[in-house]
Image: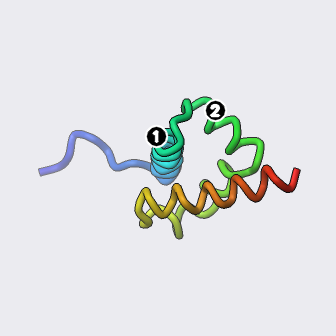
Amino acid sequence: MSSLIPPFTAEEKKADFISFCIEQYAQQFKMSGTEVINRFSKTGLLEFLYNHYEGLHTQGGEFLVQLLHEMLTDREASK
């Protein structure tokens, strides 16, 4: 029996993963999704998540939030 929903493309999987990371970070730090997107965008973290999807998508939300927080803090401090 075939599925009525086609499998996700690689781009859709990456977008879903990035969305998950944004939502997890926003919840943890009680921020809006827009604020997280803006900060991630300014510091290159959106690009980092996109480019490192293969190595990161198997990690848990807690690990990802901690990693992203450390990276965001470092990158914002160096500007």
**Place of residue 20 in the rendered image (x, y in percent of width and height, measured from the top left):** 45, 46
**Number of numbered discs on residues:** 2
Q: Can the viewer see residue 12?
A: no
Q: Residues within 10 Å of mark 1 (few under 14, many from 20)?
A: few
At mark 1, the secondary structure is: helix
At mark 2, the secondary structure is: helix
Residue under the point 48% across and 64% down: 63
Q: Are marks 2 and 1 in contact (CB under 8 Å)?
A: no
**Place of residue 59 in the rendered image (x, y in percent of width and height, measured from the top left):** 44, 66
> Which residue lies under the disc numbered 2?
35
Q: Is residue 48 left or right of residue 77?
A: left
> Which residue lies under the disc numbered 1?
27
Residue under the point 52% across and 55% down: 65
Residue under the point 68% across and 52% down: 45
Which residue lies most toward the bottom here? 55
Three-letter amino acid code at disc 1? Gln
Q: Is residue 35 left or right of residue 24?
A: right
**Sequence-wise first label, 2 or 1:** 1
**Place of residue 62 in the rendered image (x, y in percent of width and height, measured from the top left):** 44, 59
